[in-house]
Image: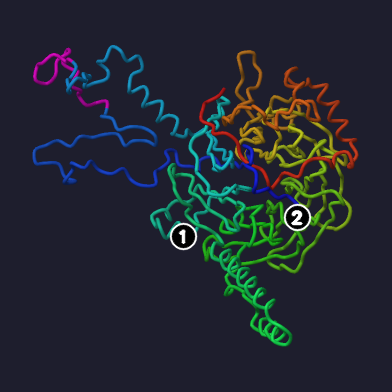
């Protein structure tokens, strides 16, 4: 099992990432509280005969400033409105210019600085938003990044602090009912910019990503159920102690009475009782969120209804549930994978009808995904480095098995437009592209994105050539796969920014981690020769293909030595600088 020792501090790490759909996030994010009026303001109305001063509304992170078409004090050939020379003002021993533009010692004008700050917070029509879950030491957060596709530039936009270590994310455009009760005016918006976060806590937090200084989630799913379960456990433990002190028939009678009463059940409010390890949201049923937990259950939540109790609990797994995925076309089909080494497909309209597949003796699942182009097929990535593809219409052996990596295949994703293209990310620090359209998968490309061990990858749903990845160095990276001729052939209409020599730009990285001193991630002697590869600048294409061919033939026993790290992922250093 994957447990994190409470006696040690987690290293920096990106544990999960997800793209937001283009055009849904607000162009200018709001704030948790409106800006307070000046303390000297006693009325909202201007005095009689006075002209109202128009000011631009401040953008997030910006400052108030007078409109450009208004006269300033410096517009009279160096004289103020009363004809005096525009000299520095005096306050005690401090001299200052009333207008910073007049200060000859300032090389950077205030207006330019304001423009720069405001531009950083304003989303353009071509911008894409990428969200990562990260932690460093005892600090955890969700960080929102902006990817400027025309310039291959990735930078941190804002972050949301979290009280508990994050394990999984699910972006959604549906505003939950508690958020509408607080802000009924938001009901007019067709879509929202919401993020569900699963952590080591047994409940799910939903955050509004359009608020930059948000202090609390807009909704918490299952909080009362988790508390009821905790109270039930405490009550059962206390009862056990009392029974231990009793003797004979009295203890037996007490036990029978407890059974008749149903024990300490907590009153019928149900939720998870352990860490939430997987989340899945689908656009076909926008008000439904699925969650998988270390308590062995899968639960469905109605975002438009009671957020304290799940509407359905599935108990077909006998160990921790690690991965979930809604079918891309059939809204009632849910794919699940758990540490009982089984993958299952459930029709949630008939929860008793479950079809399951065995993943093998050493194949703890890491990730699961439906093929959007072959609707009856799905793939499971496993800790032994393998990827298995199954036919959902029939139980039995997999259609194919691929030893994709030498270490754990921690994440996988199908390309939304290129038929038969599957991406995999691994603890061996590489990301690979595969052609799985035939009976036998074939390698298309291998890339070391210099993110450390890769824990999460995801193709952009709006720009299919972009593959995002996050890893153990606490950074996010975006790979424009059009740098590979194989992807150019499969995405003929896609466009990419080019450098001066005509090469595709596609290596943006953001997120500034701590110094790599004594870092276990950058162990040069680690299997795979990470230090040598860094000194050589990475293997060339022929070497990459040769290494990957060896990966395909790697026996399961050799690949099974990878560390079990999925639920113990943590996120890395805080990003905040533009790169590119």
Q: Is residue 327 left or right of residue 56?
A: right
Going from N to C along the chain, the mark reached first, 1 or 2, is 1
The front one of 492 and 141 is 141
Badge 1 element: helix
Cα–Cα gap, marks 1 and 2: 31 Å
Q: Which mark is residue 338?
A: 2
The front one of 408 and 439 is 408
Horizontal and vertical percent for residue 269?
57, 70
Magenta-drawn segment: 68-87
Look at the image and say whether residue 84 sits in the magenta stretch: yes
Q: Which mark is residue 178?
A: 1
Horizontal and vertical percent for residue 209?
49, 45
Q: Which mark is residue 233?
A: none
* Residue at horizontal 63 percent and vertical 48 percent from the top: 168
Q: Quadrant of residue 262?
A: bottom right
Label 1 neighbourhood size at 10 Å, few (<14), some (14-19), many (20+)? some
Horizontal and vertical percent for residue 277?
66, 52
């Amino acid at each position: 099992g994957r447990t994190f020792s409470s006696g040690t501090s987690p290293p920096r790490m990106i544990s999960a990432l997800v793209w937001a759909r283009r055009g849904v996030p607000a162009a200018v994010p709001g704030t948790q509280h409106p800006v307070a009026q000046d303390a000297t303001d006693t009325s909202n109305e201007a005095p009689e005969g006075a002209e109202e001063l128009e000011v631009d509304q401040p953008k997030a992170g910006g400052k108030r400033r007078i409109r450009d078409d208004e006269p300033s004090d410096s517009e009279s050939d160096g004289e103020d409105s009363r004809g005096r020379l525009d000299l520095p003002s005096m306050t005690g021993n401090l001299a200052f210019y009333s207008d910073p533009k007049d200060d000859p010692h300032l090389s950077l004008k205030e207006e330019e600085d304001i423009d720069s700050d405001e531009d950083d917070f304003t989303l353009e029509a071509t911008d894409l938003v990428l969200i990562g879950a990260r932690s460093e030491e005892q600090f955890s957060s969700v960080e929102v990044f902006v990817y400027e596709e025309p310039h291959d530039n990735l930078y941190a936009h804002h972050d949301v602090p979290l009280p508990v270590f994050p394990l999984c994310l699910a972006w959604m455009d549906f505003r939950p009912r508690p958020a509408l009760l607080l802000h009924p005016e938001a009901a007019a918006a067709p879509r929202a910019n919401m993020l569900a976060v699963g952590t080591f806590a047994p409940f799910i937090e939903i955050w509004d990503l359009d608020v930059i200084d948000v202090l609390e989630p807009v909704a918490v799913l299952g909080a009362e159920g988790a508390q009821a379960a905790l109270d039930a456990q405490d009550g059962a433990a206390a009862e056990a102690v009392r029974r231990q002190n009793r003797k004979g028939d009295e203890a037996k009678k007490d036990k029978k009475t407890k059974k008749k009463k149903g024990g300490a059940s907590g009153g019928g409010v149900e939720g998870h009782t352990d860490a939430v390890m997987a989340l899945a949201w689908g656009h076909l049923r926008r008000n439904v969120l699925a969650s998988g937990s270390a308590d062995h259950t899968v639960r469905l939540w109605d975002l438009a209804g009671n957020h304290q109790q799940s509407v359905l609990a599935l108990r077909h797994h006998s160990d921790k549930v690690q991965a979930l995925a809604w079918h891309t076309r059939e809204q009632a089909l849910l794919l699940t994978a758990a540490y009982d080494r089984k993958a299952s497909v459930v029709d949630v309209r008939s929860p008793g009808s479950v079809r399951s597949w065995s993943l093998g003796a050493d194949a703890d699942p890491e990730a699961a995904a439906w093929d959007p182009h072959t609707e009856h097929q799905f793939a499971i990535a496993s800790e032994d480095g393998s990827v298995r593809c199954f036919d959902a219409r029939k139980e039995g052996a997999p259609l194919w098995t691929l030893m994709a990596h030498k270490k754990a295949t921690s994440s996988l994703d199908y390309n939304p437009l290129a038929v038969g293209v599957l991406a995999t990310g691994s603890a061996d620090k590489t990301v690979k592209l595969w052609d799985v359209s035939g009976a036998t998968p074939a390698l298309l490309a291998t890339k070391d994105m210099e993110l450390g061990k890769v824990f999460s990858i995801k193709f952009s749903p709006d720009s299919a050539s972009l593959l995002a990845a996050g890893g153990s160095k606490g950074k996010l990276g975006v790979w424009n796969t059009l740098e590979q001729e194989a992807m150019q052939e499969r995405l003929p209409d896609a466009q990419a920014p080019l450098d001066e020599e005509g090469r595709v730009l596609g290596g943006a990285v953001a997120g500034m981690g701590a110094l790599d001193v004594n870092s276990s991630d950058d162990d040069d002697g680690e299997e795979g020769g990470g230090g040598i590869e860094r000194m050589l600048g990475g293997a060339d294409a022929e070497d990459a293909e040769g290494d990957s061919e060896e990966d395909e033939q790697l026996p399961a026993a050799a690949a099974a030595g990878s560390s079990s790290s999925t639920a113990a992922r943590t996120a890395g250093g805080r990003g905040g600088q533009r790169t590119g």
